[in-house]
Structure formats: structure tokens, C-alpha cells
Amino acid sequence: MTDILCFSSTDWDGLWGSRQQIMLRFAQRGYRILFIERPIGLEHFLRYSAFRQRKQHRWREGIRAVADKLWIASLPLLLPGKYYSPHINHLNQQITLRSSRRYLRHLGFENPILWLYNPEQGELIGQFHEKISVYHCIDEWTANTTGRKRRTIAALEKEMLNKVDIVFANSPPTFENKRQHNPHTYRIPSGADVEHFSQVTDAALPEHPAISELPRPRIGYSGHINERLNYAVLDQLARQRPDWTVVFVGDTYPWTMDTPSLQQLNTLSNVHFLGKRPFADMPAFLKGMDVCLLPYINDERGHFRSPLKLYEYLAAGKPIISTPHPEAAEFADVLYQASTPDTFIQAVAQALTDETIEKQQQRQQLAQQHSWDRRVDDMERIIHKVIKDNE
């Protein structure tokens, strides 16, 4: 029996993404998983009521089974300033270590695979008598940071990269970046739950009532609504084409709710924010979208991202309009890329006009190559090889 101790950078009940998808599939393959939810510092606990309520609920629950062979747990509150002071980070990792060992003893885990998502946790490597250690790098943590914070994150991540056995990096730029520090770096892009999202083309699946009542055509985005979205493009899209309905399905980050760009967009009569919805309902929402958007800003963080929504839209068979991005460029033959508000609007209009059943089927066939099952196949093969080489 093989155990995995996973330190996630998100909560299990947060937006359903790569961390949950991957760990769930390992559990389905017989691994026992302890999924430690995202660490939270005192500053975020005090500032954001959503974090506060969610964490207080999770602490009362303690360890919770969420699937066969898969448990989740939440760390205690950590000290603020982990990305400004190595000393504070050391204290936080000591808190993390004590809590995690207690969880492991409770579940009877021994010699797990240590799976890390947070760049400051390199100090944990070697502390659990783990078989091997994995750093799954799905974010470029230094991106859009400056000064002391950037230097501290870079130093912590370099320590991690020098110690870890395997690095999985999702986007092309992240892969190139990390393999400079660790030769055992492998590219594992984001993926999709293909079976789940292919329901979109099933005639038996109705559109979700929250979207079916809105006028067509519907131009949609699903995912986090945060500072990574290109609000200049979205604002022009909605203003210049009032006959189009622009729909957002997803959670709004607490620190972006009051930003002028988001407030301004929310005043337009053809723009609808439908809020966070269960992952199970997403096919019904995508079914109600005529065109799907990847409207990210072209900044440092956007450059390094591997957009999970790209693969989910493909699995749903939907036309996709994306702002320029290295990973989107790999799929240039099945999506539209546009860099300015005018060309973005033109691309949406073209997608609405040119859509065919054949194009829909082409996208879904391509998505089959990028399922989470295939991603976990690749990871499992690499992990077993490294474990065997280390014996």
C-alpha cells in the first residue's frame, strides 16, 4: 500500500481544479491520500470573512473522509509574513510539521510520497521518512511580485527545487524555468475531466436554469473572477455588443470585489455574474454558452499559467476565444487568439458564425488526449521509475 501526503495550495471544497482531480484519481488507483488544505496566515484570516468562516468550520470538523482512501485536514493558523522572513517561514513549517505528523499517526500513514504545491515548504522534505518527494509546480509564485517578497520566494523555491526528487511543471515557461534548477523536471500540463464535460453535447442534459433564461448569444467564462482577467477587453466586449449576453460563472476573489473595473462591468445590463457553482453543475452551464472565453491579462503571472479551463472547454466542444498565451498557442488550430478588444470582438463574432458540428467533434477528440486520467498515468509512471531507481 502506498500513501501520499499532499500539501495543497487550495482547499478541497474550493474551486475544483488540478489538485483535487489528481489526488482523487490516485485514490481511485488504490493509494491512500491525506490532503492538507491550503495554509492560511493570520492576516488573511482577519481580513477576509470567507476564509475565516471556512477555516473555522474545517477546524471543528478535523480530519474528514471525502472519498474512499482520501482524507482532508486543515493546518492551524500560521504566522503572517512567510514570504518576507525566512525565520517566520521556519516557525510556520514547524507548526505544519507537528500538525501533519499528528494527522499521519491518526491515519496510520508510513513512508508516504510527499507531494508539495507551496514553494516555502522545502523544509518539510526528509521529515516524514518519505519514499520520494514531488514538487508539483502549477503556479509561478514569484510572478507579479517585487522586492523583498520576490527575493524571499525565489530563495525558498530554489531550496525546494534543489532538494526534491521530482518536479512536475505545467506550462511551457514554467517547465523551462524549473528544469534549470532540477534535471528531474517533467512537463505535465493541466487537463480535464473529459467524461464529465463531454456531457455538454448529450441531448439529454438540459441547460442550467440560471443561464437558460438569459438571451442568446451567450458569451461565457467559468472560473475564478480575480485580478488575472482582462477587464479592458471584457468591458469593451459588453459595451460594443449589447446584443450579446456576457456570463461569468465562478467565485469572485474577496480582494477584487470592490475594484473599479469589476464594479463598472457589473453595471452593464447584458453582463451577468452567476456566482460560484458546484463542479457537478458546470456541464449544464457550459451547455448554455455559445462561445467560451480565456480572457487573461498578458502579465508575468498570465504568461506562466496553464489554463485548466482551456481543456475543459475543449472537452465540452465549445468554441474558445483566448488572449495570447503560450499554452493557447499550442492549440492555435482549434481556438481563436486575439490581443486587442477589437480583434477579440471580431473573433467572438467569427466563432458564432463559423461553428459546426465537425469543429465541435474535433475539439472533443483532441480533449481525449488531455484527460486527467492520462496526466496521472504519466505521473505514476515517472514516480514508479524514480522509486525503483532509488531502491
Image: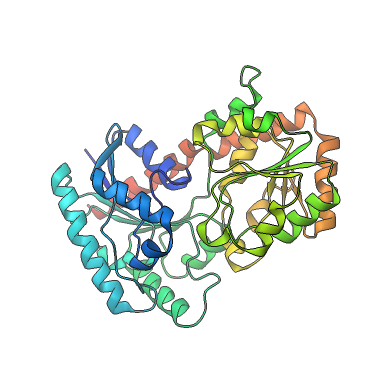
Work out which residue is located at the far top of the displayed protein and give it.
Answer: 204
Between residue 351 and residue 261, name the one nearer to us.
261
x, y percentage for residue 329?
A: 69, 53
Image quarter for residue 25? Answer: top left
Q: Can the viewer see residue 13 in this picture?
A: yes
x, y percentage for residue 243?
A: 84, 41
x, y percentage for residue 174?
A: 53, 62
Q: Can the viewer see residue 325 in this picture?
A: no
User: Is 220 left, or right, of 142 in this rendering?
Assistant: right
User: Is 113 left, or right, of 348 in this rendering?
Assistant: left
Q: Which residue is at a point 82% across and 50% down the rendered structure image?
A: 345
Number of numbered labels in the structure image? 0
x, y percentage for residue 126?
A: 22, 62
User: Is 77 left, or right, of 372 in this rendering?
Assistant: left
Point out the image quarter for the N terminus. Answer: top left
Q: Which residue is at a point 40% across and 60% down the rendered structure image?
A: 184
Between residue 210 and residue 186, name the one nearer to us.
210
Q: Which residue is at a point 68% across and 61% down the rendered structure image?
A: 261
Up the image or down, 5 lies above or below 200; here it is below
Judging from the image, the colouring scheme is rainbow
